[in-house]
Amino acid sequence: MKGCNLAFWREDYIRVNGYYSGFEGWGWEDYEFGERLINLGIKKKRLKMAAIGYHIFHPRSSRANYVPNEMIYRETVLFKYTYRANGYMEA
């Protein structure tokens, strides 16, 4: 799952506690968030050519923590996490 052109119900976002804030720099946060939705049983719908997508400008983040961020994602896959502390509820 990629974060670009992504939409989700607020209720589902809250159920997985949103994006995990333990990531530093660039990489894997969208995949990890999506994996928790998948682990919860949330199904995706494709809206190819049926929705407008906007990109919000943001500065580029460092890719120095790519591997540590990947390990966070892989842990979510391995243990089938559906919720992580340090997300929406703690913000």
Image (spheres, helix red, strand yellow):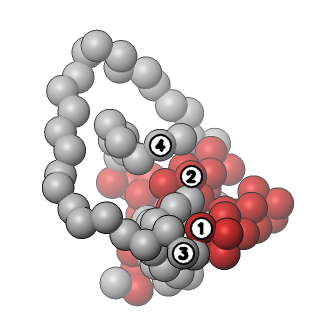
Indicate the amino acid at tag 1: Tyr
- Assess whether mark 1 and mark 4 are in contact (beta carbons under 8 angstroms): no
- Assess whether mark 3 and mark 4 are in contact (beta carbons under 8 angstroms): no
Residue that appears at 74% across and 61% down: 74
> Looking at the rendered structure, which numbered label has been put on residue 64?
3
Q: Is residue 65 visible?
A: yes
- Assess whether mark 4 and mark 2 are in contact (beta carbons under 8 angstroms): yes
Outermost right residue: 78
Residue that appears at 26% across and 15% down: 50
The residue under label 1 is: 66
Q: Which of the two discs, 4 and 3, sits closer to the camera?
A: 3
The residue under label 2 is: 31
Which of the marked residues, 4 or 3, is nearer the chain's N terminus? Answer: 4
- Identify the element where label 2 is drawn: helix
Label 3 and label 2: CA atoms lie apart by 18 Å
Which of the marked residues, 2 or 1, is nearer the chain's N terminus? Answer: 2
Q: Is residue 78 above or below residue 21?
A: above
Name which quarter of the figure residue 89 lies in.
bottom left
